[in-house]
Image (cartoon, grey):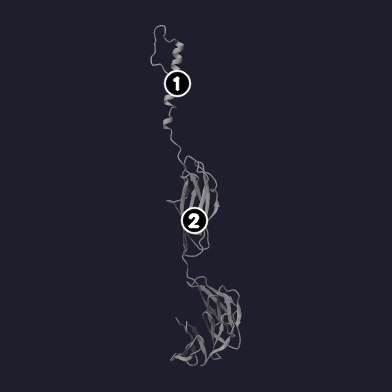
Amino acid sequence: MIPHRWDLEGPRALRPGRLFIASVTMFAALALVAGPAGAAGKAKPAPPAIAFTPSEVGAYEYGTIDAGQTASQTFTLTNEGDTASGRLTIGLTGSTAFAITHDGCSATSLGPARTCTVTVAYGPTAAGQSDNATLTASGKKSTATTSLALAGQSTAPGPSGHIYWANWDNGAIGRADLDGSNVNQSFITGAPRPFSVAVDAAHIYWTNDNGAIGRADLDGSNVDQSFLYGDFYARSLAVDAQHIYWTNFYLNTIGRADLDGLNLNGSFITGWPLPYGLAVASAHIYWTNDGSVTIGRADLDGSNVDQSFITGASIPIGVAVD
């Protein structure tokens, strides 16, 4: 306690020793009142603040890649605060085209200015698709949370399907994409002078100069040059969802078989001479009669045959329907 009055004269005057002790006591008391020097202005440590990079306004764009390809990006998570994040959890939600392939952050705690990394791969499976996902990180402390929006696209689909043709002179079936690219003049070889070509959802078919009908898978595998062979002479052919049809040029008939080659009937439709071209629609089959210069028609079950459905043609060879 500091005295409220100092008596500096007379018998009670303070001697030097006492004055020194009183001075020490006074300054100690003042120190207790004021507290530690500068304590009132000291800043409180900032809470954890985490963020992913690279990032542009909270998002990352993978760009456009081909379907079936993969693009990977490694993201760095940094704690820009003054205190640790606490135990981290990493999450990825959205399109399954995105996947975490490396996680060096989960179950760790980031101290101030410390980093960890997460790698996310983008792999679109189909052409022309657009995908989005969200990468998240959260720590034990409520302020230790962040998210990053991810986006990617796959290239637009090109023309689907192919063009097929018969190379009569070199005994091959050719193929190209519908835009004319990827031409392969020898897609299927070994055909004895093929004439006509037809396709369905699973196979390609062609007629051979020896009268047989060949078949292969659409990728050119499992070639059978005599898939259908018998007492007939196939020239043109067509297919629908259930059957193969063909013209027997010298036998003056239309043949038919199931798509698996069973129930072969070389005389499914009989009539006028030299049927050549052939086409099939949802309800009817059509053919050209080279010998009688007409177009014939019948129901798909072979009934209601009309060999003169269209007359006046001039040596008709090919026929098509839309």
Image check: 172 left or right of 129?
A: right
* Residue 187, above or below 90: below
| Quadrant placement of the N terminus | top left
Type of amino acid at the residue the image marks with label 2:
Thr
Quarter holding residue 20:
top left
Type of amino acid at the residue the image marks with label 1:
Ala
Residue identifier under label 2:
93
Residue identifier under label 1:
28
* Residue 233, above or below 117: below
Q: Secondary structure at mark 2?
A: strand
Q: Residue at x 55, y 77 (%)?
A: 204
Give the x, y percent position of residue 197.
Answer: 53, 80
| Quadrant placement of the C terminus | bottom left
- Looking at this view, is 287 or 14 the one in front? 14
Give the x, y percent position of residue 123.
Answer: 52, 60
Quarter holding residue 101:
bottom right
Look at discs 2 and 1 and give the one toward the viewer.
Answer: 1
Give the x, y percent position of residue 252.
Answer: 54, 91
- Looking at this view, is 89 or 201 the one in front? 89
Q: Secondary structure at mark 1?
A: helix
Crowding near the residue tagged with mark 1, few <14, some 14–19, many ≥20 C-alpha atoms within 10 Å: few
- Looking at this view, is 243 or 307 the one in front? 243
Do tag 2 and tag 1 residues touch (Cβ < 8 Å)? no
Give the x, y percent position of residue 48.
Answer: 47, 42
Q: Residue at x 61, y 78 (%)?
A: 224
Quarter holding residue 194:
bottom right
Crowding near the residue tagged with mark 2, few <14, some 14–19, many ≥20 C-alpha atoms within 10 Å: some
Disc ID at residue 153: none
* Residue 293, above or below 166: below
Q: Earlier in the sequence, mark 2 or mark 1?
A: 1
